[in-house]
Amino acid sequence: MQPWSNFIDTLSCMLQSSELDKEMKNMKHENELMSRLFSDRKVVKSVSLWLEDCHNKRQTGGGKNVEKSESLKNSGNKEFQTKNYIASLKSYTKSALYAPADSKNLPIAVANRSASLFYLKRWQDCIKDVKLALELDYPKDLRHKLYLRMAQCYSELGEKQLATEALLQASNVINECDMPGERKDQLRKQMDEIKLKVSRTKNNADSVGTGESSSRPTVAFGENSNFSSASAGIEVKYASQKGRHIVANRDIKRGQMLFVEEAFAFVPVNQNKLDVLDKICHNCCRSCGNTPVPCTGCIDVTFCDMNCWNEASSYHRWECPGSQMDLWAQIGIAHLALKILFMCVITIDSEQFNEVQKLVSNFDEIAPTDVISYGITAAMLALYLSECTNFFKDIDLKESLRSKFSKDTFNGNYELTTRDDERLYVSSLLLKHILQLISNGHAITKINVITDNERDQFCTQQQDRIATAIYPSASLMNHSCDPNILNSFIGHLLIVKAIKDIAAGEEVFHCYGTDFRRMSKAERQERLKSQYCFTCACEPCTMPRYENFMERFLALKCPECRGPLPDNHNSPACCFDCGAIATINHAPEKLGEAQSDFLRAEIAVENEKYDVALTHLKKCLSIRQDVLYKYHNDIAVTWDFIAKVYVMMGRWSDSILCLEHSVAVIEERYGPSGIELCNEMNKLTDLCVKYLQQESNVKTKRYKNILKKTRRYLDRAYDIIDFTYGPWHEVHSEITTKMEIFSFVLKTVGNA
């Protein structure tokens, strides 16, 4: 089967010969292009054949496999019998994912997983799996085991009433089952033992919960009655050059929340490449943990619980065949356009529906060849809905879509009397949504912890994109390469917080992925023009003081002021700070020598020759500090590597000193609110706490000095993370835990 990207290139070339790109110049609306594409029989036939090929070559049962599920279940049983409950948990989860909907392996794998959870004392998760197994039609003659397990979990949680109800259900199953009397007597004896334990349980009605904070962030100044999900402190304005944009209507302080908005629609990214335990819920975008609820039709889609599983059934029925055909990984942002269509169909919120429709599509500004490619994809999706799903049979387009438009600007061009009319209408909407997403799509990110290897114990955090979404209200913020807001997420809930004071009348600016601290002006301008169809005129793009910001961190050291001197490769250069003209002789040769030492250090670490690695790294650092500007990125990287080596050697205090140097460089470049500084501060506090816990001699000057530093660093890390991500984020809880450990250390030292 030809990949969609190759297929669409071939089809686009064919259409270019028909001069469609020239016809595009006179088109003003999505339906004009879609009508032209559907009138071309070669296009329709080619796309239909490609879809048919996908359908025929899809993995049997969408990747579901009874034999594989059975094998994984058996592996889980062996691991369970050896009391390796964590390993058995993973095997049972995989068995459930591979089990077809009509297979008995699905409820059995989930029930077996509940047993692993029981022995891991994860009572709430065990109860959830018991309920799921029952809903999946677990064999009736075995259900007493699940009810007894559930009763024990409720007893452990202090839920006497629920435990008693579970015991009653177990009793009913035992009475109705056809089993030997001796076996029934054994089970009744077991029930009596559980009843006795339940009777002695102290009732705790508040014990059962999700384990997550239910508090939802709230916007500053109260909610805006005229602007969904926004603070009353901001409002929408319109200007001919800017279009719609957001302005503060009062003074806003740093840290105040301006938006708390749920995604209208989102799709996870790269889920088929992730381990089963790393997947996110396709309905709420939260982690599924190691107890995901699998889709019964396709293998890549999971949910965090039964509520999300049931909610997703309203739209995933049209999405599931495409997952089985492996379509979504091939079409990029168009998958989200399809999800937007589904959400538009099922939503009862007409106001939010119309806010989505009003987002700009730039139909007449995007390159015609690109629009044609997107149009072909929209045609394919409409044909997919027609030929591979019951979408057009399940819904009434007039009621589910057409009637929701507040204005007739989109509906006026369509008749919906035939299936061809319906496909044209839906494909035109899909093309519109694809084009909207090019300039309005929003990345949902998550902080993940990465450990380089088992030896270094050196955890780093990185911000990963886990989904792409559409936020109709927040999308109205215009761009600046130096934004005054910052985004964070709880699942698919977007929290927008001011990171600078914003005066009344000032505009609220978001960054469209081209932050001046991370990208040169030329790169920023090119990306914004090509993707968003405008030339940025923000301060970093127009003010001279920002002109060479990125180059500073790649500069040599000025011999006059020690400031940043551009690297002109042995030619004279002008210092960015003092303006002196200077040449650094033999800089390339010296830096090449430093890089060689760095590479030798990497080899030495691989061979666990840490002293040798330190020798090379110190030589490398000496050269780089002599030649490079003090905030050069290579100096920060070298300090960071030396810190790792010291950690591997158990020399915590030396590692702390190295990271302190690295933090200074990181903050200079990425500012006080960047994820990079958050990462460095978290690493630094990790090392400080580990040193204080492991150092036995608490009377030394070094220990007391690090004790003082730890308090200061923890307070600063807490302030950064509390401001950047808020108390609902897992990184925040990590810092809180370290502060509790530090308090314990202080008490211990005080008593020593």
Image (cartoon, helix red, strand yellow):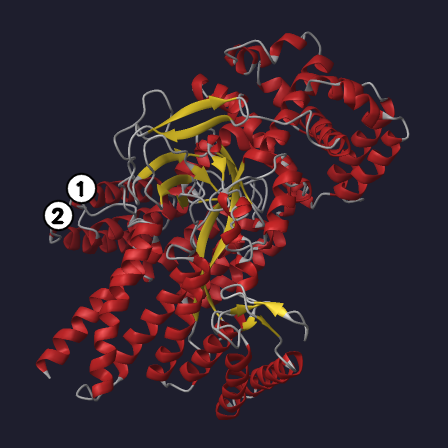
Which residue is at a point 56% across and 44% down the rendered structure image? 103
Question: Where residue 633 sits in the image (x, y, percent)?
Answer: 52, 69
* Residue located 58% across and 13% down the image: 396
Image height of 55 relative to 355, above or below: below
Count neighbours of disc 1 (C-alpha within 10 A) and say few if under 14, some if 14 to 19, many if 20 or more. some
Label 1, secondary structure: give it. helix
Q: Position of residue 468 (x, y in %)?
A: 53, 41
Q: CA distance from mark 1 to mark 2?
A: 9 Å
Q: Toward the viewer: 724 or 738?
A: 724
386 lies left or right of 14: left
**x%, y% of residue 331?**
68, 40
Query: Residue drawn 74% across and 34% down?
Result: 370
Residue at the spot of label 1: 161
Q: Which residue is mark 2?
A: 203
Q: Nearer the viewer, residue 346 or 246?
A: 246
Work out which residue is located at the far front of the displayed protein and give it.
580
Residue 379 visible in the picture: yes
Q: Residue 509, which numbered label?
A: none
**Amino acid at the residue labelled 1:** Gln
* Quarter the C terminus occupies: bottom left
Judging depth in this view, the residue of 65 and 293 nearest the camera is 293
CB-based contact (under 8 Å), mark 1 and mark 2: yes
154 to the left or right of 531:
left
Position above or below: 243 against 453: above
Residue 725, given in percent of the width and then of the height, sits at 35, 50
Q: Amino acid at mark 2?
A: Asn
At x 43%, y 23%, the residue is: 237
Quarter residue 582 falls in? bottom right
- Within 10 angstroms of label 2, few (less than 14), some, or many (20 or more) residues? some
Tell me if 4 is positioned left or right of 111 in this view.
right
Residue lying furthest left:
751
Label 1 vs 2, first from the N-terminus: 1
